[in-house]
Image: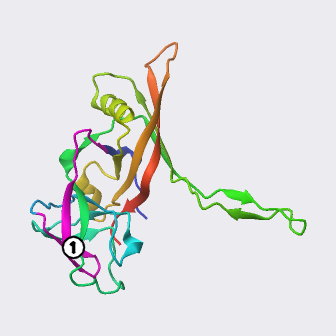
Amino acid sequence: MAYIESKKVTLLMTKSTATPHVAKVTDVNVDTPLSITTTASTVADYDLGYIKAIPGYNFLDGSWFAVESGATSTAFDTIGIAGYGLPAYPAGTKFDIALYKPADFFELCLSSIDISRGTASTIATPTFCNRGQSISSVAVDKGTVSFGGYVDVNSETYKELAAALASDEEKTIVVLTDTTVATSYSNGAQGVIVVGVKLTSIDFDLPLDGAIAFNAEAKITRRVQYVNYQ
């Protein structure tokens, strides 16, 4: 078994200037992996994609994927979505995908990161017959991401996190299981972890001796997904 070594992990986050390229999908080939044809002319290997909604394929709504190597400018196989066994894609149906390029990200230089998915809470519904009865709440918090790092007003990490908090913009965080996007997918590698977040706070730790540290919190806005080969 090949475990992921944390010494190889690289953290990325979308820049404040990043604008995903929106491409209209014109055809889907239901296979393993799922293949997509778009109107885009700039699709490239290992672009990170997001599907907000697919008519008729609602179970894939909110899915992340990566573009498999060997992509043409308009057609590609996906990493992270297995198409085998899916119903035939309705002819003529179109939907949009968002594509992020490597240049849309910067490297997060953090000392720690913790991704915690939310769980459904319970609501007590006791009766005289069953005093311990409860039901699951329909309102489920998606979870939180906690960051740790050191204050340096000249570092891209600190500047981008501060800008994200001030702007209330959604950010995409990618955890590479190797040092680059390509090596995170190649040669039986482990893939990437992707999550959408909004920063909610940045706090500071001022020790008597040592570097001034910061701790940031973010709410998960788009589900955590492990994007790897199916």
Q: Along the line of sight, which residue is nearer the eye, 69 or 36?
A: 36
In which image quadrant can residue 37 be found?
A: bottom left
- Image spot of residue 112 (x, y percent): 45, 38
- Seen in the image, is 62 located left or right of residue 126? left
- Seen in the image, is 13 located left or right of residue 116? left
Where the C terminus falls, by quadrant? bottom left
Q: Is residue 68 above or below residue 84?
A: above
Q: Is residue 222 above or below residue 165?
A: below
- Seen in the image, is 89 located left or right of residue 60? left
Q: Is residue 169 above or below residue 160?
A: below
- Image spot of residue 135 (x, y percent): 71, 64
Q: Which residue position is annotated with label 1?
A: 36
Mark 1: which secondary structure?
strand
Mark yes or no: residue 186 visible. Answer: no
- Image spot of residue 160 (x, y percent): 31, 33
Give the amino acid at mark 1.
Ile
Q: Residue furthest right?
A: 128
